[in-house]
Image: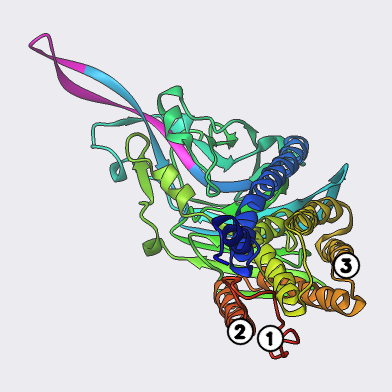
Amino acid sequence: MATTFVDASGRFMRSPGFKFFTLGVLCLLLLIPASLIWLLVSEREDRARDVARDIAQTWGGSQRLIGPFITVPYEIDETRIVDDEETTITVKREAVFLPDDLTITADATTEVRSRGIFDVTVYGSDITFEGSFAEPTGSAVAPADARFRWSDARLSLGISSVRAIRNAVTLQMDEETRAFEPSLGLANIVRDETNFSSPRGSSGNLTGIHVPNLFLVNPRGFAFRIDLALNGSDSLFIAPAARDTTASIVSNWPHPSFTGAALPEASTINPEVGFSAQWQVPHLARAVPLAFTLGGNNYLSQLNQDAFGVRFFQPVDYYALVDRALKYAILFIGVVFLSVFVIEVRTAKRVHVVQYVFVGLALVLFYILLLSLAEHLGFLIAYLLAGTATAALIGAYCARSLESAKYGALVVALIASIFGVLYLFLRLEDYALLAGSIFAFGVLAVTMFTTQKIDWSGRGQKNIPPNLPDKSA
């Protein structure tokens, strides 16, 4: 009797090949709830950043230090054409003089502040500036007829968050001690010069403190020392503001991330006691002269871009780890489906597509469990608990569906192995792509040879496990 179209189509829809492609489509559909979880991770990460910003507003944010430097107002006559007539006008400008040498030492003591379930690393630092200025001369920045107001000279120190200062800062100038006052002390005509981006990329105005009336009458060279107690969080940056800048940062934080325009000349990191790092930046390594006029040259902004320092790095950022794990979701779900599918076709046990849906949803919920537990217990413990619960649930479900405790245990072992490989991917930052591609290639090779004798078209009378005789023959 000839095979009808209904029989042929029904046999095709029951064939392993059709089911294989159906499971492929199902994997892609499960990426939709996985994407929603990715949005949840982003929302929780934004919430953590908001908490960090709130703590930074009261304690002190990422700090960057520029200076000290001397600013001196001066006037110069310029001839301009106004209404077709030459007119002489007086222009007010600000000259900046940088130190000849500068040594900065910073001792930062860190602690972890908590708000709810979120932790933020903050620090309190004791910073010392020592160095010397050569006698400033107006000829270095302006024509001979410029009129410098040396009695209005100021010594300024740029600090990104002055509200975090913890002491009454003074300038020890040779044998004299002078008190600092709020603000950089710059005139409004050069305010735009201090509007620039920080080394981390957030834009804002540079603030700071200054000593007014630095010279009584005539300028002179002098040695100086400034002791600054400053709170902060996340990072500490220092700008190379002198002809020769030497800096040293020590801290009890065991996970530093050195960053910025210069790496340390020497550094030591001890997980038990913290780290120490030393920088040396010569004059020729910068693109900023020792004396210049504030204006369109943006030299202060350039000093900021040349800043170097350290981030107080959080070694376990579980939001980033969960986000990376989600990027492997299609591979993760696909391998689990493939494992169950191979067991199904080799045992001639039927597993309905709806049952695969339940398995897929359990895998998706693994990420929610991982995220929620990590916020309270840390990533490693959360990963173990979420992975164990997911593997046990899917294994028990497959044991009932396949009517075999042995195959249920096999599924548990396979999923546990996949969880182990996924954790390896999350830890191998530099080699994750290589490891992932090798793993995918290996899975494909095993699947190809394991399913080589499967009747994908379903033309046979029934699914017969490979290597077993057909007893109906």
Q: CB atoms at circles 3 and 1 under 8 Å apart? A: no
- Residue designated by label 1: 466
Residue type beneath disc 3:
Thr
Query: N-terminal of the two: label 2 or label 1?
Result: 2
Whether residue 156 is in magenta: the answer is no
Toward which corner of the image does residue 340 lie, by quadrant? bottom right
Residue type beneath disc 1:
Pro
Q: Which mark is residue 388?
A: 3
Query: N-terminal of the two: label 3 or label 1?
Result: 3
- Residue designated by label 2: 453
- Does residue 21 appear to the left or right of 256 in the view shown? left
User: Label 1 neighbourhood size at 10 Å, few (<14), some (14-19), many (20+)?
Assistant: some
Q: Nearer the viewer, residue 347 or 315?
A: 347
- Mark 3 or 1: the one toward you: 1
Q: Which mark is residue 137?
A: none
At a point 57% along the width and 62% down the height, the residue shown is 8
Image coordinates of residue 159 in percent, x first then y, are: 60, 41
Q: CB atoms at circles 2 and 1 under 8 Å apart? A: yes
Q: Nearer the viewer, residue 253 or 436?
A: 436
Magenta stretch bounds: 70-88
Residue type beneath disc 2:
Lys
**Quadrant of the drawing holding the N terminus:** bottom right
Magenta stretch: helix, strand or loop mostly? strand
- Does residue 135 appear to the left or right of 26 in the view shown? left
Give the CA separation, mark 2 to mark 3.
Answer: 34 Å
Image coordinates of residue 99 in percent, x first then y, are: 47, 52
User: Label 2 neighbourhood size at 10 Å, few (<14), some (14-19), many (20+)?
Assistant: few
Toward which corner of the image does residue 48 lie, by quadrant? top right
Count how many numbered circles sit on residues in the image: 3
